[in-house]
Amino acid sequence: MALLEVKNLQVKFGLRTGEVSALRDVSFTLERGQRLGIVGESGAGKSVAGFAIINLISRPGYIASGEVLFDGKDLTSLTAEQMRYIRGNRISMIFQDPMMTLNPVLSIGEQMMESVLTHTSKSKAEAREIALEKLRLVQIPSPETRLEQYPHELSGGMRQRIIIAIALLLDPDIIIADEPTTALDVTIQAEVMDLLLALCKNQNLGLILITHDLGVVSQVTEQTIVMYAGRIIEQAQTKAIINDAQHPYTRGLISALPHQGAAGQRLYQIPGSMPLPSSLPSGCAFHPRCEHAQSRCQQHMPPLTENEKGKAACFLVDQRTSHP
Amino acid sequence: MSSLVEIKNLYKRFPIHGDLLDQLSFKGGKIHLHKEYVHAINGVDLQVEQGEALCIVGESGCGKSTVARTVMGLLSPSKGEIHYQQQRIDNLSANEMMAYRRRMQMIFQNPYASLNPRMTITQTLEEPIKFHQPQLSRPEMLDKVAEVMQSVGVDPSWGVRFPHEFSGGQRQRISIARALIVDPEFIVADEPISALDVSIQAQVLNLLMDAQQQRGLTYLFITHDLSVVEHFGTRVAVMYLGTICEIAPTQQLFGKPKHPYTQALLSAIPNLEDKKPDFIRLQGEVPTPVNLPTGCVFNGRCPHANERCRQQVPELTLTDTTLVACHGVEEGRLA
């Protein structure tokens, strides 16, 4: 049994203008110690997927159907009280902007210890020890001084390390990191990613890395999911996605990246932009932008089918693999 | 060949000491007057040649946007001069500056903030013409608006719409149209694609490159994204803490970075290749621009720093085709 199994998850938002689906039929699994990347552009539903796993979708959004099985238990059916035990304790989340995540009026020590004291019956002194241990784990220099400091006294990279330390406080099984380095500079990003990778390997942590940056995904994860308009359109080994993507959208995304050896030439561009969830096109959501679109792409939604390279939701891929 | 834009020994500092009462402090029975500044740019020399795309890269807080805004005259320099075609422009009055504003335009980072939400696209695009070419009649003006909208790939019939009806990529096209409408020679683009998605970034970069070819534009391109620079730039200037540490032709810089900071920066780009060189971990963090380090601004984090680096500020000197400000490179200590 997989540690985490997401099955046919649907998330909808009830708006005044009607219901829109933000997440449609999303399924994947994560094993202990596995690193999974979820990539997509803004509006693809990648963050909603992350939030849905730990049941943090708030109104007007709701999980319309599907299951999130963690250790065999369906998280979508838990009470708020039971869910609170899972969050932080077993599954932690790291958010994009470290300044928004930390409480500006509490010292680092207070907010770190708060989490330990809420979830366990440990004493204050023990909680402080745990906080110090985790700060050392994320390579923060002079952790004793940091405990007394406030978020504004620390740099962006340091703050994000502290967020990671907080996520690790209760030794969770899974960390969901939603664009953890997007607000950081490249040199700091490289440090934070290095750290996350090392932690996952050493602590046997499962990681779900949500990002728009294919470069980051290719350096950290083993498996990658590509999302478009709320659906998974491709899933495979990260190497396979980068070197030999199957879906026209993934291929387009990779060729649209500026790269070496073609300086000054026009970049490959995918025409148009991602549709809004309120006005999804019929059939395959990508067909208006796809240069290979056929008439059936407009009428039918291609299912996510498995082949020897991975999974892809595209009629063309089906044709290629079934009639070689 | 002479340069189109010359930045000469530019300094810019911002006061952070507040008003007079905030500056006063009482210590040991005496009243002290205490002034503090953020030293955003410290002695930048840069020439933008006709027809090139000069990219300035650096991490947040290195002063790259301040350089862009000072060149455009949106900020006035604390010291130093800006020349446009051998004409000094940083000390001109608003009226005298008007003639230059038509020739140099700016594109901003966030198209959600840089377009007026209460003006239609046509109104937004008309405004620069009203200022810079008041002799045009209304039909001529509308023709011009339609023509420019066409050239950036926005349907001219959408001119009656408001910015909120457009996606991020379309809005950035409209801000580019607003810059192009007065037929400028020189465009300063401050992180024009950072707020956009990958598939949209390619569209906007292509548009900028097409405009450069068709109109013979010169760009000063500010970005933190090195892969974009590698694709787009003719020359690259790397900034750190308000100073330029290296200027080189793009291929030269990416192929053989000389300054230790450039090397560290390049090693940190996440890319799709399997065999990526190891990332060079810098010690510590960027120091505060309020109290600058003595000597080379990079000395506290540089693995090769010695006593001279801590004492003396390195000058930009030419090695091969690269200008580097590093004592180590100059002495040949760093290969």
Image (cartoon, coloured by chain):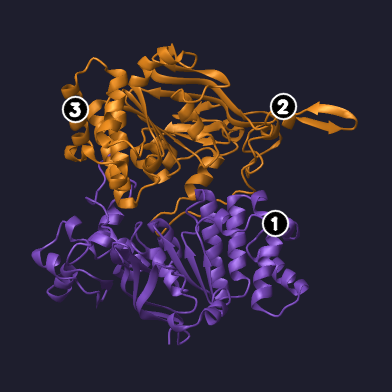
Say which amino acid is labelled 3: Leu
For the residues carrying marks 1 and 3, which lies nearer the camera in this image? Answer: 3
* Residues flagged by tags 1 and 2 on a common chain: no
Residue shown at 55%/58% (left/top)?
A192
Image vertical order of residue A316 relative to residue B93, above or below: below
Give me the chain that's orange. Answer: B
Instruction: Name the amino acid, label 1.
Output: Pro
Task: Indicate the chain on which mark 1 is placed.
Answer: A
Q: Chain of mark 2?
A: B
Q: SS class of the residue under badge 2?
A: helix
Give the structural element (helix, strand or loop) at label 3.
Answer: helix
Q: The chain coloured purple carries which letter?
A: A
Q: Which residue is mark 1?
A: A141
Residue at x-position 39% and y-position 72%: A62
Where residue B20 is drawn, which disc sits there?
2
In the picture of the structure, the residue carrying the numbered disc 3 is B142
In three-dimensional space, the C-alpha distance between marks 1 and 2, rounded to whole angstroms, equals: 38 Å
Q: Looking at the picture, does residue A278 appear above or below residue B143?
A: below
Q: Nearer the viewer, residue B3 or B104?
A: B104
Q: Earlier in the sequence, mark 3 or mark 2?
A: 2
| Residue B162 placement, left or right of A34 | left
Residue B201, can we see it? no
Alpha-carbon span between mark 1 and mark 3: 62 Å
Furthest residue toward right: B29
